[in-house]
Image (spheres, rainbow, N blue to C red):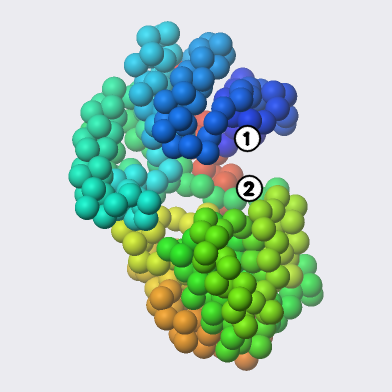
Amino acid sequence: MAKTMASEFEVHVVVPNTQTRLQDGVHIHSFEANTTQRRIRMRQTVDLVLREALRVNAAIYQLHDPELLRLVKPLQATGAKVIFDAHEDVPKQIMDKYWIPWLFRKLISLVYALYEKRISRRLDGIISVTPSICARFEKANPKVVLIQNFPLPDEFPAPDWSLKKANHFCYIGGLYASRGIKEVVLAMKEVDGHLHLAGSFDDPILQAELEASSAWKKVTFYGQVGRTQIQEIVQKSTVGIVTLHPTPSYKEAYPIKMFEYMAAGCAVLASDFPLYKSLLQEETCGRFVDPEDVQEIAQSLNDFISNPTQTLAMGQAARKRFETKYSWQQEALKLRQFYLDLHA
């Protein structure tokens, strides 16, 4: 987002624990902060963000995290416009947080929803990534625009179809129980294939359990990887896996990795959510499974292997759908106009 807007605007990004620099036309401002402990991050780190943001003296401030919403008033006091980029449906997401005791989740979710609604009325604009989240914010503020987080075409050149291996699959992203990683790994016991796994486990116990499984010998685990290595992984995979569990927040979210798989020419194995089926044109670009059914996942992976011509055709259809509908190019045009309208 910052990189593509830098050709038309002076863009500054405030972010902790990196290096202050000018990169790809974007001014990056770094500061040291403790971001691992939630209480410290929500208090001290937010104060540091405000300090750095005021130094930029911007005409428009765009906030990307819910804890930053308390900065709306002090930033607007400078005469600037302030917008919120809502990546997730936070009230629903709170209901999925395993580290919050179940008895308190509903209350915290309700309190946050009321707080978010009150702050939203003050905002000069709101960006979000799905129609359902946009509709929720429009109840408090009419200045909402849908900017979908699709991949950059430059990062996904046309695939070399000859490099794809018929029985190679990939799963890239957060390795959480709620994202279906356990079922995917265990399904590999019944599959004559190989799983490329990239990301970070949030639960060391789950990681140890999967590494002790007999299925792990069919897994190459890369850990956290950069953009270049992601390209290498998806290039040799025929199928990308996005089997998130049916939680309220996941069922209505657009998973970024689904579109990256499509951009890389991978067929997709996805959860059987109505939203996912609409995005993938039913069976044209992939298959759908109950994400909590290990046997069904295994059967679908074996079906991909047994029908290599059909699987490759699904990947080619997915790539075409990315080129015509799910590319960042058209979203960038909408974002540019949104900024121009704000600054008019």
Residue at image point 69% right, 23% down = 20
Q: Which residue in the protein does label 2 denote?
A: 152
Residue at disc 2, secondary structure: loop
Label 2 amino acid?
Leu
In the figure, residue 238 lies in which quadrant?
Answer: bottom right
Q: Badges 2 and 1: C-beta atoms under 8 Å apart? A: yes
Q: Which residue in the protein does label 1 denote?
A: 4
Q: Position of residue 335 (x, y in %)?
A: 49, 34
In the figure, residue 306 lies in which quadrant?
Answer: bottom right
Q: CA distance from mark 2 to mark 1?
A: 9 Å
Nearest to the observer: residue 203 or residue 134 = 203
The mark nearer the N terminus, 2 or 1, is: 1
Location of residue 66 with respect to 260 vertically, above or below: above
Q: On the rendered structure, is 335 left or right of 136? A: right
Quadrant holding the C terminus: top left
Give the residue furthest to the bottom. Answer: 306
Residue at image point 51% right, 43% down = 331
Location of residue 136 with respect to 187 vertically, above or below: above
Q: Position of residue 317 (x, y in %)?
A: 59, 71
Q: On the rendered structure, is 39 left or right of 327? A: left
Dot 1, how many residues are within 10 Å of its Cα: few (below 14), some (14-19), or many (20+)?
some
Residue at image point 60% right, 32% down = 2
Label 1 amino acid?
Thr
Q: Position of residue 155 (x, y in %)?
A: 70, 50
Judge whether residue 269 can be spotted in this image.
no
Q: On the rendered structure, is 339 left or right of 137? A: right
Location of residue 65 with respect to 27 vertically, above or below: below
